[in-house]
Image: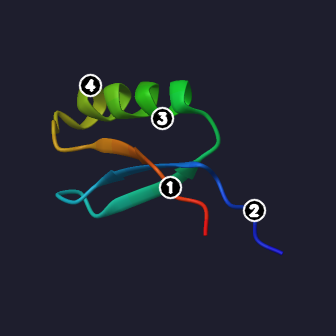
């Protein structure tokens, strides 16, 4: 059974997305992506339970 993470970090410009278990970690990953890649297009969102 797959584990569903409640958050998703993504960057459409860099074509990446990652499931993340913590909102704080998701925010940190967006900031780190901007620092490392020089890309401000990354964001995070809460994934709805289905």
The secondary structure type at the circle numbered 1 is: loop
Label 2: few (<14), some or many (≥20) within 10 Å? few
Query: Circle 4 sits on which residue?
Result: 35
Circle nearer the viewer, 2 or 1: 1
Q: Residue at x 60, y 49 (%)?
A: 6
| Foreground disc of the pair 2, 4 | 2
Residue 13 vs residue 4, the one in the foreground:
4
Q: Residue drawn 17% across and 44% down?
A: 41
Separation of residues labelled 4 and 3 (CA atoms): 14 Å
In the rendered structure, the answer to whether residue 1 lies left or right of residue 44 reads right
Disc nearer the start of the sequence (2/3): 2
Q: Which residue is rendered at x = 17% and y = 39% of the image?
A: 39
Q: Secondary structure at mark 3?
A: helix
Residues under numbered marks 2 and 3 in contact, where contact means CB atoms less than 8 Å apart: no
Compared to residue 45, the image places residue 49 above or below, namely below
Q: Residues within 10 Å of mark 3 (few under 14, many from 20)?
A: many
Identify the disc placed on residue 26.
3
List the residue tagged with mark 1.
Answer: 47
Residue 22 percent across, percent down from the top left: 61, 34
Classify mark 4: residues with Cα within 10 Å, few (<14), some (14-19) or many (20+): few
Which element carries disc 4, helix, strand or loop? helix
Name the residue furthest right.
Answer: 1
Q: Position of residue 9 (x, y in %)?
A: 42, 47
Task: Single out the residue that lies furthest toward the bottom.
Answer: 1
């Amino acid at each position: 059974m797959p584990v569903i993470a409640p958050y998703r970090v993504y960057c459409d410009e860099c074509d990446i997305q990652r499931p993340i278990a913590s909102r704080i970690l998701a925010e940190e990953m967006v900031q780190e992506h901007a620092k490392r890649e020089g890309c401000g297009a990354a964001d995070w969102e809460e994934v709805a339970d289905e």
